Amino acid sequence: MSHTSSLGINAFMAELKAKNPAEPEFHQAVHEVVESLDEFLDENPKYKHARILERIVEPERIIMFRVPWINDKGEMCVNRGYRIEMNSAIGPYKGGLRFHPTVNLGILKFLAFEQVFKNSLTTLPMGGGKGGSDFDPKGKSDNEVMRFCQSFMTELYRHIGPNTDVPAGDIGVGGREIGFLYGQFKRIKNEFTGVLTGKGLNYGGSLIRPEATGYGNVYFAQEMLKTRNETFKNKTVLISGSGNVAQFSVEKVNDLGGKVVTLSDSNGYIFDPDGIDGDKLKYVMYLKNVKRGRIKEYAEKFGVKYVENERPWKEKGEIALPSATQNEINEIEAITLVQNGCYCVSEGANMPSTPEAIHTFIEKGILFGPGKAANAGGVAVSGLEMTQNSMRLNWTREEVDNRLQIIMQNIHHTCSEYGKKDSGFINYVDGANIGGFVKVADAMLSQGAV
Ligand code: NAP
């Protein structure tokens, strides 16, 4: 990167920070993208002249609203709801809803920003958005979650639609929440449309949608491993999180002959040296999805190690699939992983590695798949759910899984095309950022001052 361009990046970031104060995750996500794009924009001045970068970091629209609801004790509670409609250049806004106490405007803006590039990489016609609330579903009854979802949708419904904005799930929003949200939308609008994805199979959902992010991440890692003539067979795999993405990553790694030895939640991690096999995974699914318990209970049930308030990155494994949340691998953890023999990191979560951790992975020349490419399988199958809803028919499991595999292979191909360095090393971060940018930027150029 030339000295002049670093000055350019610094000035751009200074202005962005001044305009969007106290949003460190948003700054982090934008900084990563502008670093990747710097040289590319110098070589392609049409994007600079049209000020695409300045426009692409500015959400088209932000909706913030009050969500009042009554808990089981009859008390009034209030949360804040959000929807960030980031970019609709290539299709309706599309991206998940996150319900977690840490949710704030900056976190949702980072997620919405990344979503624009991710959706573009899938090659499906989807713009980028994200939303959610600081509501914490943990410890709430089903009735409380339902009342919250109904109140949330009572405001959100007027801003979304199958051709406008199509939300899905994310942290804290799974099948139960999507069902409550969809029911309320349908009731208010009196129409049955594909306005949300991640729906249940009996009311318009797609086969493989629950599996898609975890499976897709493993498919992406498989493609990266192929470039070094490697596979998952007999590899030890470290996974963080124990929710939707983590669970189906374990399932697919097992299918491919690998052994997953860790899972975690926000209280700690478990280490099972024998591997989390199919039966143990069934227990995890029951524990997290039905009992809504903590991962600690796995250690108690199977008599394995539980480490409180730690993340699993000190354990040994060739492959790591961070699948919990943002900034969950720092520089020291990245160094430890590499020193312990890890040579492939594929991000199931969004932005789980800090910039310093990413720098370490790239400097050490390991296979590093950034979330906006590696975890795009979820939104890709959401796109396929929208297609099936429009056609009013359902594809088989095999058909959706085949399409998912092809999409992940194509994303890998795009990242390789834009990220291959003269040395032959593939910088998947640059590849995903440039590859995702081009389609959106060209659409914005065609559409004029939008
Ligand atoms: P989920 O089912 O709600 O599971 C989230 C998991 O991450 C839980 O084990 C949770 O533990 C843990 N976690 C959440 N916040 C945490 C924090 N601040 N510190 C430590 N652990 C935390 O959510 P998910 O759908 O699997 O999403 C996981 C990641 O994948 C997120 O980054 C999400 O944005 C990304 N992603 C999801 C999809 C999708 O289709 N679902 C698609 C693309 C990307 P607790 O139970 O203790 O909170």
Image (spheres, rainbow, N blue to C red):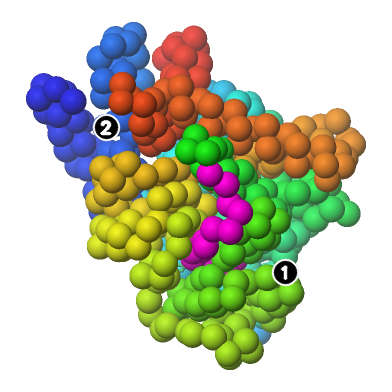
Q: Residue sitting at 53 percent across and 27 percent down?
A: 413
Please state the horizontal and vertical placement of residue 18, each as a whole percent of the image: 19, 42
Amino acid at pointer 2: Glu
Q: Is residue 361 visible?
A: yes
Q: Residue sitting at 77 percent across and 32 percent down?
A: 387
Label 2 packing within 10 angstroms: few (<14), some (14-19), many (20+): some
Comes first in the chain, label 2 or label 1: 2
Find residue 74 and report its image quarter. bottom right
Dominant SS type (magenta): loop
Ligand 1 within 8 Å of disc 2? The answer is no
Q: Is residue 111 visible?
A: no
Please tell me whether mark 1 sits on a helix, a strand or a loop.
helix
Q: Residue sitting at 87 percent across and 42 percent down?
A: 396
Q: Does residue 412 lie above or below 168 as drawn? A: above
Q: Residue sitting at 57 percent across and 23 percent down?
A: 90
47, 320: nearer the viewer: 320
Find residue 98 and report its image quarter. bottom right
Please state the horizontal and vertical placement of residue 88, each as a whole percent of the image: 54, 28
Q: Does residue 422 lie above or below 191 as drawn? A: above
Q: Which residue is mark 2?
A: 35
Quadrant for the N terminus in the image: top left
Please provide the residue range marked out in magenta: 230-245
Label 1 packing within 10 angstroms: few (<14), some (14-19), many (20+): few
Q: Does residue 333 lie above or below 70 as drawn? A: above
Using residue 46 as the reference point, say whether residue 145 is left or right of it. right
- In whole angstroms, how far apart are the C-alphas of marks 2 and 1? 42 Å
Quadrant for the C terminus in the image: top left
Q: Nearer the viewer, mark 2 or mark 1?
A: 1
Report if residue 243 lies within the magenta region: yes
Using residue 270 as the reference point, say whether residue 140 is left or right of it. right
Q: Which residue is mark 1?
A: 278
